[in-house]
Amino acid sequence: MESVLTTSFDDIRPVYDSEVPETIEKLLADDKFRKAVEPIIKPMSWEQLCSLMRSCETVDDFQSKVVYPVLKRLIRKTTAEMKGFNWENINDGLSHVIISNHRDIVLDAAFLNMLLYAQGMDTTEVAIGDNLLIYPWITHLVRLNKSFIVKRNVPMREMLETSRHLSEYIHYTIRERNQSIWIAQREGRAKDSNDRTQVSLLKMLTLKNSSRPIDMLKALRIIPLAISYEFDPCDFLKAKEFQLKRDNPHHKKTPADDLENMLTGINGYKGRVYFKFGEGINRKLDQLDFSLPKSSLLEAAARIIDEEIYKNYIFFPFNYVAYDTMTDSTMFQSEYTSEDKKAFEAYVEKQIDKIQLKNKDWDFLREKIIEMYGNPVKNFIEVHQTT
């Protein structure tokens, strides 16, 4: 669709087909890229990967020849099952902004695109924060794999213009190019799995014409998506970060921390992984009182997205055990066995054991990991009590 492409978004857009060979050469010339991917591509050799990548002339080539097979091997190795549900909610031939909860830095969007590809549907473009572009090779790779850049490290005075530029890009991509987009419901992952759509995200999406906020949201045909992982390989790293922030409110993650989270999430065992699409939100947006202030309208829109995500979670025994543990109840005891309960307790201990901290607070870390698995059930219950 290069006929409708513009140079207005060159600073944030993914790679065009015409730029694929040049981007691939930049990647293959980067020693850090080689070091990062060699363990992941086995049993394929580096030479075989080079040859395969050089045979790619378009972004679709790269996704089908390189990304898809590598992800397929990763899924076989690190998941028990991966499935998507409610395809009819997005299989209408139209483009959508898919807004989901955010569990894994890299794999939420990668797995979604894998499932779309397997359905014979077009993959999404993916929003990625520039804080994750630690090395030049990561920038080249994600842009080659249909990612566009969300600039976060900008001075305050430039923030509004940067956000408007991003908003215009998203509207252009949905309306002019009929290309779907995935974006997480918040900046960064919800470390405690208490998923909430940030109103600031929805505000950014309306900046193309902020005097008509609901019309702007409707134009994007937003579909909420619930992502459910049986096991979160990064749960212990998230718990560690909670303690570091508790002990030092000024604690900030380093690029090395981000890289550790990325690699742990990619290589760790995830068990069953399910993606379930909710219904598009436009019908419910139409029911809002348009005379409300803009901030109230956006808060209401965020609640609509959240409720749709909560309704579509899929739970596993550990989620029910965690909820009953954190609420000191037996509400879901019919959903798990005593063996499941013992297995969860042993799992939590094993994960805490991996945490390297000087003043390790076992009780606090245990509580945080239990919350990560119990909070989705809590939100699911709340939405069913209010609807």
Image: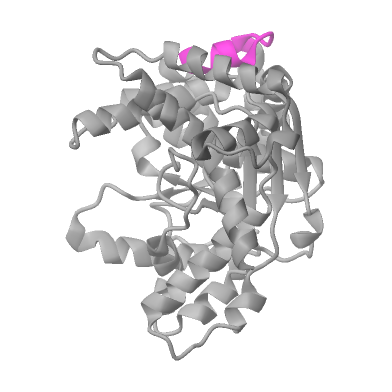
Observer-nearest of 338 and 278: 338
Which of the 4 image quarters holds residue 231? Answer: top right
**Per the image, is 255 magenta?**
no
Q: Is residue 363 visible?
A: yes
User: Which residue is pictured at 43% across the width and 36% down the height?
Assistant: 139
Q: Is residue 46 left or right of residue 338?
A: left
Observer-nearest of 217 and 5: 217
Residue 248 spot, x, y in % from top left: 18, 31
Residue 220 spot, x, y in % from top left: 58, 69
284 relative to 275, above or below: below
Observer-nearest of 104 and 180: 104
Q: Is residue 100 visible?
A: no
Rendered-image quadrant of the N terminus: bottom right
Residue 331 spot, x, y in % from top left: 65, 42
Rendered-image quadrant of the C terminus: bottom right
Q: Is residue 125 left or right of residue 120?
A: left
Residue range corresponding to the magenta coloring? 35-47
108 relative to 369, above or below: below
Which secondary structure is most common in the magenta stretch? helix
